[in-house]
Image: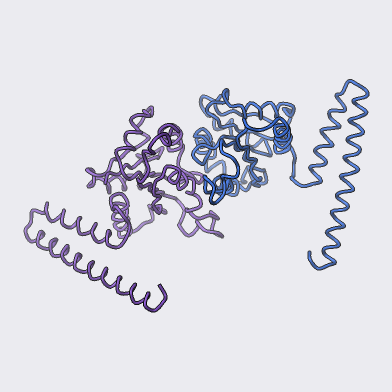
Chain colours: A blue, B purple
């Protein structure tokens, strides 16, 4: 799966979180195309449309400014998604997935009724969900990053993996999650130079596979029991 | 009350509805400032902020492109509403009102669950409601214009008056509506050159006042009866 990350940020150089995300995506450069709108002087509609055609997952990545993406993403939407491209003939984006990676300077708890923002991110990002729907795309649950600069080192490590999975994991279920981690371990194993490290990575990957299968089996059994009990 | 109409439309000259609205606002040029973003080469933040300070009602007026205003309004929001302006010290826009005049090429019935757009305009325009809330402004119910080119002459006349009221009527209740129409009639009367026409306009205005008072009285009586019946 090829993923296109469309970054809309007016001050990329000064953004800690955007630079962190860029570094997190770097090991996946075979699969992930980093597309920073701030580096584009004049949008070439044909080039942008070709990018959309050549990727299966599209990511809108931006800081939340006045309850929406910065203007550069709206310019991109208004310019690139012409009616002719989006709707005439076979819809070229149908069946692809659209994800939103949104960073905010406000804690997550404020995005709810009664919080300082009074609305959830699902409500605020609704226009992007509607764009996905209109184009026949699957809308992924947004990945929200709140107050990045306050995150601990551990929280950043978890974010890094969550972000990498958001860009590259084909479907978001337990089996695919296990498969994704296993693949990462096998890849690291294949490039490890130290034989002891290689063995450790192989062992970890084997354990993960085994436990993953066990947990999947258990999941099925629980579902069966529930169905028999009439709760399913 | 002074009203600032911020128009965001990339092709103003080709827009039937925008030109219709502009003509509708023209008789109110003492109260209404028409501010077409397409005519501005480079936003002067201080000038824009002064405009906001000097008007009590702000209108965002635009066609719906990909479930939001065109990019020029987002550029305006991101550039003009600096944190320092919006939040430092006394909030300069607190107590003012924010209206949205939105035109769509799609019939109104499609903006609901099950319709082709799957969402109401209230949901789609939520980010502007949140901007108003954040700035301490009163959010007015949006004025939506669907498929302007299909409107009959009568529907256009009604739209003209609705739009004029949206820009200039201070509060949206029955008494203010009657007062607004009365004021329009008195004004026309004062500039009429034909004495017969003057008399007719005076008569109409008097009737309107009388009937308005009668209807207001009846409204109060109904409310009283309801309260006595315990339904209030």
Task: From the viewer's side, name the closer residue of A84 and A2.
Answer: A2
Q: Residue at x 36, y 77 (%)?
A: B228
Q: Is residue A200 above or below residue A209?
A: above
Q: Residue at x 37, y 35 (%)?
A: B37
Q: Residue at x 55, y 55 (%)?
A: B118
Q: Residue at x 57, y 22 (%)?
A: A13
- Residue A88 in sight: no
Q: Is residue B230 above or below residue B53?
A: below
Residue ranking furthest to the bottom:
B229
Q: Position of residue B70 (x, y in %)?
A: 45, 40
Q: Position of residue A101 (x, y in %)?
A: 62, 38
Q: Quadrant of residue A14?
A: top right
Q: Quadrant of residue B91?
A: top left
Task: From the viewer's side, name the closer residue of B72 and B156.
Answer: B72
Q: Is residue A129 above or below residue A223?
A: above
B220 left or right, relative to A189? left
In which quadrant will I find the C terminus of chain B?
bottom left
Q: Position of residue B133 (x, y in %)?
A: 44, 46
């Amino acid at each position: 799966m090829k993923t296109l990350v469309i970054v809309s940020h007016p001050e990329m150089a000064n953004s800690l979180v955007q630079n962190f995300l860029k570094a997190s995506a770097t090991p996946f450069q075979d699969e992930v195309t980093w597309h920073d709108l701030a580096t584009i002087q004049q949008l070439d509609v044909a080039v942008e449309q070709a990018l959309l055609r050549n990727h299966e997952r599209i990511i809108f990545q931006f800081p939340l400014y006045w309850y929406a993406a910065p203007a550069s993403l709206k310019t991109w939407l208004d310019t690139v998604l012409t009616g002719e491209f989006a709707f005439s003939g076979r819809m070229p984006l149908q069946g692809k997935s659209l994800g939103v990676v949104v960073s905010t300077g406000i804690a997550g708890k404020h995005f709810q009724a009664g919080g300082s923002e009074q609305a959830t991110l699902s409500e605020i990002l609704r226009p992007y969900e509607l764009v996905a729907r209109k184009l026949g795309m699957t809308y992924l649950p947004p990945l929200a990053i709140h107050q990045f600069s306050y995150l601990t080192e551990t929280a950043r490590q978890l974010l890094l993996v969550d972000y990498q999975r958001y860009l590259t994991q084909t479907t978001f279920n337990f089996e695919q999650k296990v498969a994704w981690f296993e693949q990462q371990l096998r890849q690291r194993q294949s490039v490890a130079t130290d034989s002891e490290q290689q063995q450790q990575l192989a062992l970890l990957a084997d354990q993960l596979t085994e436990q993953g299968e066990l947990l999947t089996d258990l999941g099925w059994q629980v579902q069966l029991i529930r169905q028999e009990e009439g709760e399913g």
